[in-house]
Image: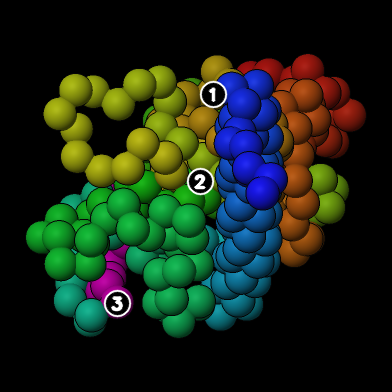
Amino acid sequence: MKQSRGFTIIELLVSVVITSILATLLFLGVKSYIKSGQRAAELSAGKTLISAFHAYAADNNGQLIRAMDLNPGKIVDNKGKPVMSHAAKRWPWRLAPYFNYDMNTLMVNNKDAIKLNDSMYSYLVTVFPTFGMNGIFVGGKFGTSMAPDNPRSKKGNFCVTTIIGANTPSKLIVFSSAKIQGEMPPGTEGPKTGCFDVSAPGYGAVGEVHYKYSDKAVVAYFDGHVELNSEEELKDMRRWSNLAAIQDNPNWSF
């Protein structure tokens, strides 16, 4: 009778190595699949957001929503409760009626970071939405030092405030994937990603572009289209500033 033999040490090691490789490939495949889904969801949310941006303008005689308004009037959240203080002054709740208060649009890929039952919910979603608005150059920060009509604006009205004001709508950024600049302070509550405010580096925005999809960010443009852009592409100030586009100067500054 022929006796069966067991596995040799080498055979066992080879099996372990092959299993590890297969597990790694499976993990990377799943991770890539998840990231691809997140990217698609964010692109879709960007299209919804820019559509809401234009719907607001259509309802307001062509005036764009203000990125920051120190006198916003009565604003309510998705539960119909009044939104107070800075939460009302920022753009998210003022634009929310135009995407039917669908918080998946505002907080896509970030919505689990802030719980609906959080007592600070209506405030936190205005600090950490997935997208930041290019509010210095589009819409405006009225009542602040970056307002289009502020005396400090030595270059004239550098901010687009009407639907017909953009020189190159297909190249003017309105919203972008964003995050808070720098590291979050120790003990700070809230997600590490997302910010209501974004701009080119050096222009005083609270947030910065978040290049999270193979070193690219989701960007929604004034003409309504949405695309993925790299850091190199977004160094071009003609994408941020109407005056830079008018002067055809990629290195424009004020």
Residue positioned 52% across, 50% down in the render: 131
The mark closer to the camera, 3 or 1, is: 3
- Which residues make up the magenta segment? 69-78
154 to 194, vertically: above or below: above
Res. 194 visible in picture? yes
Main SS of the magenta segment? loop
Disc 1 from disc 2: Cα separation: 14 Å
Q: Amino acid at mark 2?
A: Gly
111 to 104, vertically: above or below: above
Q: Which mark, by number, is residue 203?
A: 1
Residue positioned 75% across, 39% down in the render: 229
Please report whichever mark, 1 or 2, sits nearer to the chain's N-terminal start: 2
Q: Amino acid at mark 1?
A: Tyr
Q: Is residue 63 left or right of residue 239?
A: left
Please report whichever mark, 2 or 3, sits nearer to the chain's N-terminal start: 3
Where disc 1 sits, the SS reads: loop
Judging depth in this view, the residue of 45 and 253 nearest the camera is 45
Q: Which residue is mark 3?
A: 78
Residue positioned 10% across, 60% down in the render: 119
Disc 3 from disc 1: Cα separation: 32 Å
Q: Is residue 95 left or right of residue 22?
A: left
Q: Which mark, by number, is residue 188?
A: none
Res. 161 visible in picture? no
Please report whichever mark, 3 or 1, sits nearer to the chain's N-terminal start: 3
Disc 2 from disc 3: Cα separation: 20 Å
Q: Is residue 71 magenta?
A: yes
